Image (tube, rainbow, N blue to C red):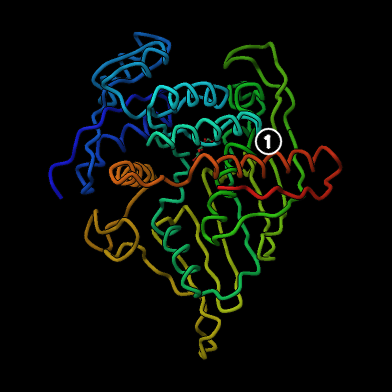
């Protein structure tokens, strides 16, 4: 491969996701051989001084305080949206119309209607060689990518059960303030869209199949919270604290899902288990370099699950990193996401997950909300055309 061509990146937002993406943009070309070299051209935030501090800390060359100015810049070809969900649709649609490739953090949008507009914009842009991707980073954890590979190879046979949990506890204290993630107009939904979206995407990715219908329950345990850290005045929490749902995949497999911010002691626990006619797979993000495989065809009665340490060069993404046994972390999932994006943009392939994939996840989330609101009735899901 010759020297990679430079490509300018402009990123909007600099909180947790902005920092995670910045790390990926900074390191990706130091580890992966890619057709494009990311230039960290500009970062955008509303507060000039705070954005300048973020630029200096995270490694961006310049600062904008208006995203419209950012997407107009000739030295920017990729717009990376790391701002809250209520901003995604407007920025992404404008950026695509301005001829910029877009990477948009999950969930794609706050509503199905917005996601549909984003898909329409992505389809128009694609005709002009302009591409888009939604950032479901956990797909790029090597053990999850390996799980998909093993299912696709038929190692599990016919898939019967998909079990997924995403457990956090950061708002268990009723005095925790009413931050934007707890306001429906900013975040869309609560645990459901923020972390439930990840396990919908990750499980569908692993089994290579989509949910055909769901029925669900949601709950808001703490209904009012202080407006600020020290405020005595309270405001209403307008999102779910927890969402539980079951579903049926297109091929008939049964799925159960739990997303909660009230699982005391669980900080960022993602557990996924898949059971098939020939075997099972189990993953736990707290041991993210491991995948557990059970071979139901083995004659050994004491076989049980085998622990695969997913650090071998033949495992997904691992050839670019350290010798076997030297572990990766959370941040590498973003580096892999951006490596895949740059590889696809360099070769003209449509990146994945697409905005269509993001819309389909949004439809699942909306169906859970509808089911919960209507007494947990079954909600069939539409087929998504690519
Ligand atoms: C907050 O719950 C959060 O940062 C999510 O928004 C991320 O997507 C998840 O990966 C970690 O938790």
Q: Residue furthest bottom?
A: 299
Q: Is residue 241 above or below residue 292?
A: above
The residue nearer to you, when weighing 263 against 347, is 347
Residue occupying the point 41% across, 45% down: 350
User: How many tags in the picture?
Assistant: 1
Residue at 75 percent of width and 37 percent of height = 219
> In the displayed structure, would residue 318 be above or below residue 13?
below
- Which residue is drawn at the image coordinates 43% and 11% (left, top)? 46
Of all residues, the one furthest to the top in this rendering is 48
Report the residue that reaches farthest toward the front. Answer: 127
Residue 113 in the figure: left or right of residue 120: right
Residue 62 lies in what quarter of the image?
Answer: top left
Badge 1 marks a residue whose secondary structure is loop
The residue where tag 1 is placed is 241
Q: Residue at x 29, y 66 (%)?
A: 314
Seen from the viewer's position, the closer of residues 330 and 315 is 315
Q: Along the horizontal axis of the image, is 45 left or right of 246?
A: left
Q: Residue 371 appears in which quarter of the rendering?
A: top right
Side of 363 where 25 appears, left or right = left
Indicate the position of residue 300 as horizontal and vertical percent values.
51, 89
Q: Position of residue 337 (x, y in %)?
A: 38, 44
Percent position of residue 366, x then y: 70, 38
Percent across and percent down for residue 296 are 55, 81
């Amino acid at each position: 491969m010759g020297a990679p061509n430079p490509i300018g990146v402009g990123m909007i937002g600099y909180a947790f996701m902005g920092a995670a993406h910045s790390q990926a943009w900074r390191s990706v070309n130091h580890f992966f051989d890619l057709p494009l070299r990311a230039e960290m051209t500009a970062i955008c935030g509303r507060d000039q001084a705070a954005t300048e501090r973020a630029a200096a800390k995270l490694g961006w060359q310049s600062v904008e305080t208006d995203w419209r100015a950012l997407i107009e810049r000739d030295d920017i070809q990729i717009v990376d949206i790391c701002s809250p969900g209520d901003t995604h649709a407007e920025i992404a649609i404008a950026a695509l119309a301005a001829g910029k490739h877009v990477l948009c953090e999950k969930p794609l949008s706050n509503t199905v209607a917005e996601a549909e507009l984003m898909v329409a914009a992505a389809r128009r842009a694609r005709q002009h060689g302009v591409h888009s991707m939604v950032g479901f980073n956990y797909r790029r954890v090597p053990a999850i990518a390996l799980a998909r590979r093993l299912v696709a190879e038929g190692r599990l046979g016919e898939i019967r059960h998909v079990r997924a949990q995403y457990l956090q506890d950061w708002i268990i204290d009723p005095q925790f303030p009413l931050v934007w993630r707890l306001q429906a107009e900013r975040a869309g939904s609560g645990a459901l869209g923020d972390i439930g979206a990840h396990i919908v995407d990750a499980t569908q990715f692993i089994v290579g199949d989509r949910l055909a219908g769901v029925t669900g329950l949601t709950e808001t345990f703490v209904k009012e919270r202080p407006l600020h850290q020290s405020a005595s005045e309270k405001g209403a929490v307008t999102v779910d604290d927890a969402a539980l749902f079951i579903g049926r995949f297109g091929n008939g497999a049964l799925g159960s899902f739990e997303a909660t911010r009230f699982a005391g002691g669980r900080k960022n626990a993602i557990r996924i288990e898949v059971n098939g006619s020939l075997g099972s797979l189990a993953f736990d993000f707290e041991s993210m370099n491991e995948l557990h495989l059970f071979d139901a065809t083995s004659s050994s009665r004491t076989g049980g699950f085998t622990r695969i340490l997913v650090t071998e060069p033949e495992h997904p993404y691992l050839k670019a990193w350290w010798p076997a046994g030297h572990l990766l972390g959370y941040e590498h999932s973003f580096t892999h996401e951006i490596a895949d994006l740059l590889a696809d943009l360099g070769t003209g392939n449509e990146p994945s997950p697409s905005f269509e994939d993001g819309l389909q996840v949004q439809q699942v989330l909306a169906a859970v909300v509808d089911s919960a609101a209507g007494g947990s009735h079954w909600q069939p899901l539409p087929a998504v055309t690519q």
